[in-house]
Amino acid sequence: MKKFIIAAVLAGISVSASAAEKVRFAMEASYPPFESIGADNKIQGFDIDLANALCKEIQAECSFTNQAFDSLIPSLKFKRFDAVISGMDITPERQKQVLFTQPYYANSALFIAQKGKVADATALKGKRVGVQNGTTHQKYLTDKHPEITTVPYDSYQNAILDLKNGRVDAVFGDTAVVNDWLKQNAELAAVGDKVTDKDYFGTGLGIAMRLQNTELQSKLNAALDKIKQDGTYETIYKKWFQQ
Ligand code: ARG
């Protein structure tokens, strides 16, 4: 049997009895500290460390793919990968299309602008605000703030470049990500209070999978319970959010 397996592996035939479960994750990786491309060209961040810890727990091999945020749910449904971990809010609207794990991070949103240029959120009336395509930020602004011109971008990196160039007056993103931009850019400042409207920003961040995949959902939920209890979650959280 052993000889057969070795021969089969050499011949490139997959041997299911010995193969570990594989979980293919996808994300849009220009969103530090959740996910970004590191100096070694690999995807890094809180979501990656979390996914790796969960995969270790469920004894699966994980892989990570970077692609446009607004294509993540359609591609997941099309089975191009098995799960999305991308700073994604668990919203009632998305729950019609995908299953989520329990929340793994309490999220909120925040505006950012050039220092001294925008007094508060009401001063954004008639102004241009950058958001990423397909995000809860985009939907919230277009639904709730028609008096603001919402400017969609493929990545938040480009939105921030345009904010610095003055092509948009503000950018609207997740609080932890805005805090990261503030650290990198002394000329920028947060505007107004955190936005936590549950209809739009949901109940926290979750890992998404296909509606049928209840097996993976219960495995990941159990693994999340485990790493929250044994301190692994806290270590990863501190590494990315409390430096
Ligand atoms: N939290 C927001 C949402 O769920 C934005 C997430 C953007 N994530 C990213 N990796 N670019 O829509």
Image (cartoon, rainbow, N blue to C red):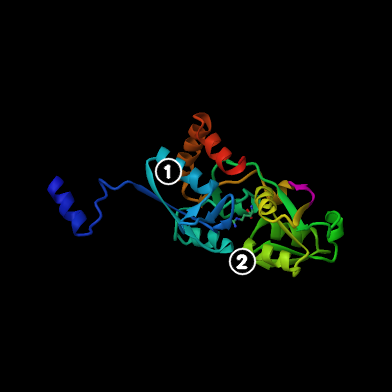
Identify the residue at horizontal 52%, vertical 29% (top origin). Answer: 229
Q: In which quarter of the image is residue 55?
A: top left
Q: Any magenta on residue 147?
A: no
Q: Residue furthest front?
A: 186
Q: Does the residue labelled 1 lie within 8 Å of ligand 1?
A: no
Labels 2 & 1 near each other (Cβ < 8 A): no
Q: Where is residue 234 in the image (x, y as percent from the top left)?
A: 55, 34
What is the CA distance from the residue labelled 2 to the residue labelled 1? 29 Å
Q: Where is residue 21 in the image (x, y as percent from the top left)?
A: 35, 47
Near-viewer residue (239 or 200): 239
Question: From the image, which quarter does the C terminus lie in?
Answer: top right
Question: Which residue type does callout 2 highlight?
Answer: Asp
Classify 10 Å Cα crowding around label 2: few (below 14), some (14-19), many (20 and above).
some
Ligand 1 sits in quadrant:
bottom right
Near-viewer residue (93 or 233): 233
Question: From the image, which quarter does the N terminus lie in?
Answer: top left
Q: Quadrant of residue 60?
A: top left
Near-viewer residue (181 or 98): 181
Which of the labelled discs sits on residue 55, or is there none?
1
Question: Which residue type does callout 1 highlight?
Answer: Cys
Residue 1 can be seen in this image: no
Residue 39 can be seen in this image: yes
Q: Sequence order check: which comes first, mark 2 or mark 1?
A: 1
The local secondary structure at tag 1 comes to helix
Magenta residues? 191-196
Horizontal placement of 76 versus 177: left or right?
Answer: left
Q: Please name the residue that numbered disc 2 is placed on.
A: 154
Q: Where is residue 190 in the image (x, y as percent from the top left)?
A: 76, 52
Horizontal placement of 86 versus 92: left or right?
Answer: left
Q: Any magenta on residue 195?
A: yes
Q: Where is residue 124 in the image (x, y as percent from the top left)?
A: 83, 60
The local secondary structure at tag 2 comes to loop
